[in-house]
Image: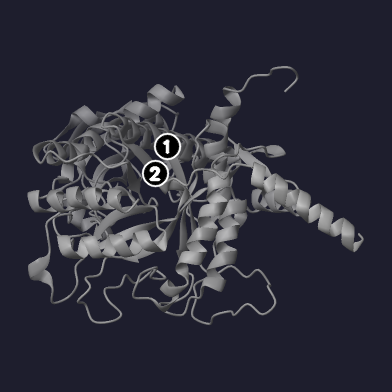
Amino acid sequence: MKKNSILLFLLCSAMGAAAQNWPEVRPEARPGSRWWWLGSAVDKDNLNYNLKEYGKAGLGSLEVTPIYGVKGNESHNIRFLSPEWMEMFRYTQEVGKMNGIDIDMNTGTGWPFGGPEVSLSQAAAKAIFECYEVKGGESVKLEIDIRDPKEEKQRDVAYLDCLMAYGADGKVVNLTRKVKDGYLQWDAPTGDWKLVALFVGRTFQKVKRAAPGGEGYVMDHFSPVAVKSYFEKFDKAFKTNKVNFPRTFFNDSYEVYGADWTPAFLKEFAARRGYRLENHFPEFISQERTELTRRLVSDYRETLGELLVENFTTAWTKWAHGHGSTTRNQAHGSPANLIDTYASVDIPECEGFGLTDFHIRGLRRDSLTRPNFSDISMLKYASSAAHIAGKPYTSSETFTWLTEHFRTSLSQCKPDMDLMFVSGVNHAFFHGTPYSPKEAAWPGWLFYATINMSPTNTIWRDAPAFFEYITRCQSFLQLGKPDNDFLVYLPVYDMWNDIPGRFVGFDIHKMDQYAPKFIKTIQTIMAGGYDVDYISDSFIKSTSCQDGM
């Protein structure tokens, strides 16, 4: 192109840009950040100071997540949801608004949801199976208990849910009602019988990184009773203290370990799958992978996923809507179809983890970083759900473990931020920003897994320019509508068929093992210059054809 032609092109472009109205910059277009309240040891003077600093730099959203306190500062800790805590949250909302910052809130402390109000009867549950051999043709008296030494602590809390007998001729007998005071008394018919007992126990998992007042058992995410009961403490705290509910409630990645059951599971399974799982316990718990065991395990996994979506994420979102709030959720790690789980909330949120190698010449690499799990195929579960379900925002937990503290440069952050944008993110949150009082000695209060996007970090001087770049991008991205080239079916039944064991959670660290063919397909399509969204069975069933489209 000749020089004068280039100048004419630039002039026309400039005139076009001038004619184009720049989108109104709203708080949600600015970057947000997870705001760690260590021990909830906050005070009004320092809340005011911090919020002014964040606002001047260009943050538009903060998500309050209380965690453990600072050593030696215990006397200043504030109990979660106490009247004093609620007053600090009310003040934060007030000052945040003055500084152009929306205030969100974790529906709990640390992660996952739980706390002191969660009793063992409503805590995360697990299935424990015990097998017995019985010779028929005589009266049997047999102690039915948990014999596995690894489950010794369950003996005081677990209860017998079901005892089934299986004959060599294929006959199945439910013996649950014949167990009294821990003993089975049964006139066994002739033949060899295999007995399988199902005990419902508890995982005993407690909230990780809990803040004062938030310590306790993790709730049963599959139980509507436990979930409803959990939210009641928030209803009471906000109503009693006359505090406005936050713009958005947040839930971190699903890290509920060992929870593979719920008390009503057998009843729910029969209603949803059309047959009784207890009639097939021997095959269900077998280590042998036959066609029958694969189908049983697949049905179990599908049922558990449905219970999570219906009784937790959908119920949580409905509860939040009842208070004028929305929900932002990280579905990864959960046992449900990730698309359906993400789509059941208002703002699906993906998670970047580790420093991505973009092979950019001259860009400093770092020896102190974690393995990278920010593959674009993983990031697109959240945006795909948002796109096919008509959700306006896709969020991201951004820069988790990018490198270690004070070793991360903005030049390293920028490419990973762009990766989020091309993955469909338009409402990014940093991981993260610890609240730190002005009088704290440098480098202030810190959280172990964050890059520390805070005024005490040396990158803060230049962060406003980076924040402004993010704001410009998100201002336009939030105006746009998804228009990807392909919808690619997520073969979740293939995954459930192929993955060994019984319980499976789709966490970002294992997806390369769980879905290698799917990931390769996505990467091949994108390498060819096309973009995709994923679609699930439930969304395929709800699609329609109009004008050949």
Mark 2 neighbour class, 10 Å CA radius: few under 14, some 14 to 19, many 20 or more:
many
Residue with the mark numbered 2: 328
For the question of whether residue 20 can be seen, the reply is yes
Tag 2: amino acid: Arg
Q: Residue 427 in the image: x percent, y percent? A: 48, 49
Q: Considering depth in this image, is 438 or 301 the residue closer to the camera?
A: 438
Q: Is residue 225 above or below residue 379?
A: above
Circle 1 sits on which residue?
A: 346
Residue 539's x, y, as percent? 56, 28
In the displayed structure, does residue 331 sit left or right of residue 113?
Answer: right
**Residue drawn at the location 35% of the way across and 62% of the way down:** 54
Report the quarter where the N terminus lies.
Answer: bottom right
Residue 540 is tagged as none
Task: Assess whether mark 1 and mark 2 are in contact (beta carbons under 8 angstroms).
Answer: yes
The image quadrant of residue 373 is bottom right
Q: Quadrant of the C terminus?
A: top right
